[in-house]
Image (cartoon, rainbow, N blue to C red):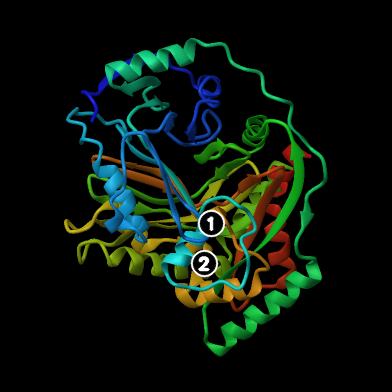
Amino acid sequence: MTSALTITALPYSPAPLETFSRLRQRPGAVLLDSGRPAASGRYDIMSSDALATLEIMPNGEPVFNSSQLQIPETLAGDPTAQQQWMLDQLPICPLSSELPFLGGLIGYWSYDLGRDHLAISSQHTHVTRLPMARLGLYDWCITFDHETQQAWLVATPQRRKQVIQWLSAPTAPGTPFQLTSPFAAELSQTEYTKRFTIVQRYIRAGDCYQINLAQRFSANYEGDVWQAYLRLRKATPTPFSGFMAWKNQAVLSLSPERFIQCRDRVVETRPIKGTRPRGATPAEDLALAEQLLSSTKDRAENVMIVDLLRNDLGRVCDPGTIRVPQLCQLESYPNVHHLVSVVQGQLSKQHTPLSLLSAAFPGGSITGAPKIRAMQIIDELEPCQRSVYCGSLGYIDTRGSMDTSIAIRTMVADAGTLHVWGGGGLVADSKAEEEYTETLDKIRHLIGALE
């Protein structure tokens, strides 16, 4: 359905948001942002004008938009099969390239989609009207490689002409962004503590070992959400960020956490568990980092999730290939210190990246253990559904490459309201006041950047 792809060099920029600003008002514009130069990511990927878009609506109904394609009726009710069918409509690019994306799916999968997939019913209504998933089929992209300091346009000759025209057009000024109300918490500290106490009862009863309990904050706004994203990114650049907006909805993600990467069938996940705020002085900052590294509670929390992810990956990886090359290593970001582990495996030949994503989704670092029971308890105790928060943003390439984030530090815009969640893992020796404070520490910089 497309002519041959070509890879054309473009001028490199260490901060290519200006390039995306010329595309962002195109239909289906998407940005996967590595946070450079401040963060440690390597690639920025951007595109627009998808060949097709699949939305899984809150009631589970698929909405497919394309002037060229039509999903077979036999795939109705199976979102994974629908996405694989979309991916199969693009020919596998024959070019030999180290670039991560040469055409395929880009978008998000919400936490609620994962809960739905696992047949965990919810007692709550959807807090936003955003789809449970929104994925575009893209036959072109611009990629900035910050390691080699190069930029590339991957496109057919026809697409290349279109993109050059879009990049040459003047950037339309956006309406200034501003909050029209302060962020308000859905739970008071007293209400959070009541839920914390119930989690402790479940842990003592043996229902679970860990629960990731979150709370939501909301504010009204007016203006251009892209301006909001720029302010958020300046405050806390992170390597797994992303921006996508359509109609009066948007996802603004500043995530530090990879969910799953798959390249050449090598699978990697990087769970984050264990958090401390950054210090006001170098000495205080060092003390907080050392406190986190020496915390038996935070290490135990991290190791529990590593074990859960080893089990999840073991369902789709070759036996004997699961390993943990990094356990509880300190990583520091503008607002917090984290403990980060790495779990790797070799994807079995009978599985695809989409089946890998489905097997492990949603990520264990934001559910708890065991996963199913933890998610049931989360739905019981959190006052609303999570929407995109704790889902994933990312891409799946026609060649079988995939990279996805855990959508933490993520804002969801819906018809003039911004929502953001903060959460943390609770274990047997957690303390209510400390955990409540951690939910605030994780989003303080985001809220502050907009207020």
Q: Distance of mark 1 from mark 2, alpha carbons? A: 8 Å
Residue 258 coordinates in the image, percent (x, y): 45, 49
Residue 97 coordinates in the image, percent (x, y): 24, 29
Q: Answer yes or no: is residue 344 visible.
A: no
Q: Does residue 194 lie above or below 292 as drawn?
A: below
Q: Residue furthest right?
A: 181
Residue pictured at 68% horizontal, 75% vertical: 196
Q: Does residue 208 lie above or below 212 as drawn?
A: below
What residue did someone put label 1 on? 390
**Horizontal side of residue 230 vs 349, given as left or right:** right
Can you tell which quarter of the image residue 234 is in? top right
What residue did someone put label 2 on? 367
Q: Quadrant of the C terminus?
A: top right
Mark 2 and mark 1 in contact (Cβ < 8 Å)? yes
Residue 46 coordinates in the image, percent (x, y): 44, 29
Q: Nearer the viewer, residue 16 or 181?
A: 181
